[in-house]
């Protein structure tokens, strides 16, 4: 068929008209099969049901004369009928369903198995009535010729056994099971009997199991079909739990030993896995004399004659090694460790250039098997650390850890990323040895690996900083120099991919960085990036995650100039942005500000910019603002914020009077009613707002502390600059004077010592404050510090610093940053209230006087030096 040209190029002349008609005829031919597939009037008549029939009559009609799909719908609706009219359903509908199931297809059989189980779970009838009405139908369909249908009914029966009384189980299930498990029965019947016996072993006392069930178990373990032996072997674990330790040792263990030497590989595999799962039930003698030789035999044959067990062996090796740890000799301990190391590099010899022509060309199936083995080794790596002792990690397992983290297969690296946190916890103080691998996984080319690692990234980084050998260092990042580039690279790769959930998760976890790296590093490498994501990203959850993380960074930023710059950008680029989408994100950001900062902070910087959006030309912005207004009003304190309350009331009046959009006006009226019911907190503490006020006061204190810390750091830098200038002048003077007299030398010495002693005297009062100011980044977020102690004003800075850790920890979503605070979660940056500014001025007045004394003293000493020189 020819392509149809655009309307502007179409020629409706006689020469082209017939060509278009042919195309239309071809389209009608294509549509004909669709028309033929519609139902005929006779079919429609046959599918039509009288609307006056009730639910029971309709069900009976559809089961009797309807099509299969209609009968299946009735069976699927059986739980509803049982809830509405159980008596009539059991009397009329259920016998009809039992009759139809004899000739029903697979779909109706599967639906019936699910419906019967749902009726049991809904408890629509008593268990006695259920066993009388439904159990026989379930037992009749157990041996259906279709394996899927048989398994569906078997799952329903196993669930029913849990609820049935023992007498019913004995007469209806156990007694017929004796004949069903005989060798003369079909294979399907014997397989079903194996699974039922595993369930029944936990329903009766040990002596009943020994007398009536164990003989059948032994018979099925010796069945001529390997499928039956395999199935019964996997049920031995449940049988052992039902009969206890003694019978397990005398009955089950010998059967397992025999099955472990079976000619069928699937039987040997089932015996091995059952043996590992029952390891806790065997004493040390059984483990040493019976289990250990079997395990050694499995390990030796896995590389030679029985590779079928290799994958399972690699999966259970960690549990096996730790379960047999107490009976290993040093030689056996080393042998199992070497066996694990060999499995970790299985299939990589050829890639690494270590092939000595001993390995043949690997098939695709072998490669898949070897990948599964290495993945299982990665899964068992934490267990193997326990096996060798974390103290020996670097010597015994680090090389293997390196190989697994650099494995060419994504699934292996993904498993290592999942278990990385467990490895870090086990290593404890030795966690510094795996810092390079953390950076490697952060830079992995697969986003699946990154997503797996990010799940516990805050906890991992905290262990790296606090548990490493450099934990006592003032710098948080000395031990992981490549961490910041790795984190930025990971975020950029997530941003450029289509997996926005990974990007959102990453941004949420990055909110932990204030306790990991310094404020300046966050400001220059991460904070502006968060703002860019808010402005440019098109995914709403990602934008919100970036906005919250940005607020956290702003909360713990230590420079007022930087804070003001970020606040200004938020207001100008979001609140006053040209795009309504940015203005909506500004309101989202303000919600996070109200959650993380004090009320006074929000009122000073964001209250009026939020109210300006009442005049926004886009209705959606005004609607979102109306929903936010109750939270905005809750930040006010009377009488301090009385003028802001007047502004809020004025904006609401304008909205009521001038709003033309019906939807907005409806929400405004609803919001006004909610605002009228709200109570405004006062400057003084009120009993009903006590907890909220206490938390807000805590935020203000921490914001105030940030301001004072910044001031102390500035004064320290100024003092260091003055002492450096004095020392430079003295050095220059000594260099110019080729032959200085002893008097001049003595005078210069006295001068320099006097100035330094004067400066040191002035510094004594601030020494402890400055030290705490330097260490604020490491203390402000750490959960180990206690709440603020209000008992002693002399220890104000110590109490404030300790409160910064526990009183205001963040509560992130996805448990990315868990709080240990006694109150609600919150963050703060710096206070804007006049009372806090006044307290800061009074607090620093003595320090300013000391600075003035120091300056005057240094001027006097410099004048004396000039006079002595002249």
Image (cartoon, helix red, strand yellow):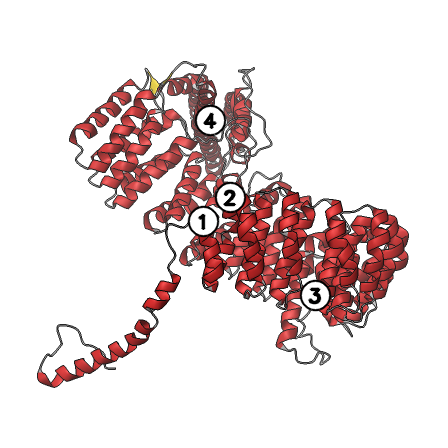
Instruction: Look at the image and tell me whether residue 193 can be seen.
Output: yes
Would you say 335 lies left or right of 187 here?
right
- Neighbor class of circle 4 (other Cα within 10 Å; few <14, some 14-19, many 20+) is many
Reading the chain from its start, which is encountered first: label 4 or label 1? Answer: 1
Q: Report the front residue among 405 and 410.
A: 410
The single residue placed furthest to the bottom in the displayed view is 15
Say which of marks 1 and 3 sits in front.
1
Q: Nearer the viewer, mark 3 or mark 4?
A: 3
Residues under numbered marks 2 and 1 in contact, where contact means CB atoms less than 8 Å apart: yes
- Is residue 517 at all visible to an observer of this figure? no
User: Element type at marker 3?
Assistant: helix
Q: In what quadrant of the picture does the N terminus appear?
A: bottom left
Residue tagged by mark 3? 311
Q: What element carries label 4?
A: helix
C-alpha gap between disc 4 and disc 1? 67 Å
Q: Which mark is residue 702?
A: 4
Quarter residue 366 falls in: bottom right
Disc 4 versus disc 2: distance between alpha carbons? 65 Å
Residue indicated by mark 1: 55
Mark 4 and mark 2 lie on one chain; the one further toward the N terminus is 2
């Amino acid at each position: 068929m020819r392509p149809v040209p655009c309307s502007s190029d179409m020629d409706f002349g006689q020469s082209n008209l017939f060509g278009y008609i042919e195309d239309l005829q071809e389209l009608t031919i294509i549509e004909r099969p669709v028309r033929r597939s519609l139902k005929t009037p006779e079919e429609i008549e046959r599918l039509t049901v009288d609307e006056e029939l009730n639910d029971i009559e309709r069900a009976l009609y559809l089961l009797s004369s309807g099509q299969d799909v209609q009968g299946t719908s009735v069976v699927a609706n059986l739980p509803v009928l049982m809830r509405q009219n159980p008596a009539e359903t059991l009397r009329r509908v259920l016998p009809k369903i039992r009759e139809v199931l004899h000739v029903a297809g697979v779909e109706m059989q599967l639906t019936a198995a699910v419906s019967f189980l749902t009726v049991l779970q809904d408890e629509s009838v008593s268990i006695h009535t259920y066993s009388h009405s439904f159990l026989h139908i379930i037992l009749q369909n157990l041996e259906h010729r279709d394996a899927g249908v048989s398994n569906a009914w078997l799952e329903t029966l196993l669930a029913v056994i849990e609820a049935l009384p023992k007498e019913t189980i004995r007469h209806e299930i156990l007694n017929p099971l004796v004949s069903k498990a005989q060798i003369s029965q079909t294979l399907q019947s014997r397989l079903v009997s194996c699974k039922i016996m595993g369930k029944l072993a936990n329903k009766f006392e040990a002596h009943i199991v020994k007398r009536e069930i164990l003989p059948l178990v032994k018979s099925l373990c010796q069945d001529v079909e390997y499928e039956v032996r395999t199935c019964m072997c996997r049920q031995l674990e449940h049988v052992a739990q039902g009969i206890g330790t003694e019978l397990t040792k005398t009955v089950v263990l010998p059967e397992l030993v025999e099955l472990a030497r079976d000619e069928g590989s699937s039987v040997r595999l089932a015996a091995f896995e059952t043996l590992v799962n029952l390891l806790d039930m065997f004493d040390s003698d059984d483990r040493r004399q019976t289990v250990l030789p079997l395990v050694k035999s499995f390990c030796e044959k896995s590389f030679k004659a029985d590779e079928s067990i290799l994958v399972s062996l690699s999966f259970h090796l960690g549990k096996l090694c730790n379960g047999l740890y107490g009976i290993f000799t040093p030689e056996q301990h080393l042998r199992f460790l070497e066996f694990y190391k060999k499995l970790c590099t299985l299939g990589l010899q050829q890639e690494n250039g270590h092939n000595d022509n001993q390995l043949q060309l690997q098939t695709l199936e072998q490669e898949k098997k070897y990948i599964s083995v290495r993945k299982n080794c990665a899964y068992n790596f934490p267990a193997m650390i326990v096996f060798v002792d974390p103290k020996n990690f670097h010597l015994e397992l680090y090389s293997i850890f390196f190989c697994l983290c650099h494995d060419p297969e994504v699934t292996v690296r993904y498993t290592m990323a999942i278990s990385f946190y467990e490895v870090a916890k086990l290593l404890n103080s030795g966690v510094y040895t795996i810092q390079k691998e953390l950076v490697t996984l952060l830079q992995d080319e697969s986003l699946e690996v990154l997503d797996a690692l990010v799940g516990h990234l805050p906890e991992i980084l905290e262990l790296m900083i606090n548990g490493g050998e450099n934990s006592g260092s003032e710098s948080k990042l000395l031990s992981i120099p490549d961490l910041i580039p790795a984190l930025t690279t990971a975020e950029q790769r997530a941003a450029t991919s289509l997996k926005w959930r990974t990007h959102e998760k990453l941004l949420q976890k990055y909110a932990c960085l204030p306790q990991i790296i310094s404020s300046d590093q966050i400001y220059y490498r991460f904070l502006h990036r968060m703002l860019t994501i808010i402005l440019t990203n098109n995914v709403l959850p990602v934008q919100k995650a970036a906005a919250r993380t940005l607020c956290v960074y702003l909360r713990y930023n230590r420079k007022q100039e930087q804070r003001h710059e970020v606040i200004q950008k938020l207001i100008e680029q979001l609140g006053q942005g040209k795009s309504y989408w940015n203005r909506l994100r500004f309101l989202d950001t303000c919600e996070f500000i109200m959650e993380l900062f004090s009320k006074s902070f929000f009122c000073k910087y964001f209250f009026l910019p939020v109210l300006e959006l009442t005049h926004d030309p886009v209705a959606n912005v005004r609607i979102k603002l109306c929903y936010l207004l109750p939270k905005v009003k809750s930040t006010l304190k009377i009488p301090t914020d009385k003028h802001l309350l007047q502004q809020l009331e004025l904006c609401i009046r304008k909205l009521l009077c001038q709003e033309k959009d019906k939807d907005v006006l409806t929400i405004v009226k609803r919001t006004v009613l909610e605002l009228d019911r709200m109570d405004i907190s006062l400057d003084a503490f009120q009993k009903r707002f006590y907890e909220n006020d206490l938390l807000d006061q805590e935020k203000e204190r921490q914001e105030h502390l940030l301001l004072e810390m910044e001031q102390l750091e500035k004064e320290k830098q100024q003092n260091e600059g003055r002492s450096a200038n004095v020392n430079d002048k003295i050095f220059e003077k000594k260099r110019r004077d080729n032959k200085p007299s002893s008097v001049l030398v003595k005078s210069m010495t006295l001068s320099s010592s006097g100035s330094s002693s004067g400066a040191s005297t002035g510094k004594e009062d601030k020494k402890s404050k400055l030290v705490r100011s330097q260490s604020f980044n490491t203390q402000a977020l750490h959960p180990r510090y206690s709440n603020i102690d209000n008992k002693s004003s002399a220890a104000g800075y110590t109490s404030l610093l300790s409160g910064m850790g526990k009183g205001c920890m963040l509560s992130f979503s996805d448990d990315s940053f868990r709080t240990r605070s006694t109150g609600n979660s919150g963050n703060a940056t710096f206070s804007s209230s006049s009372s806090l500014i006044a307290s800061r001025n009074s607090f620093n007045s003595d320090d300013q006087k000391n600075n003035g004394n120091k300056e005057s003293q240094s001027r006097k000493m410099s004048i004396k030096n000039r006079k002595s020189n002249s």
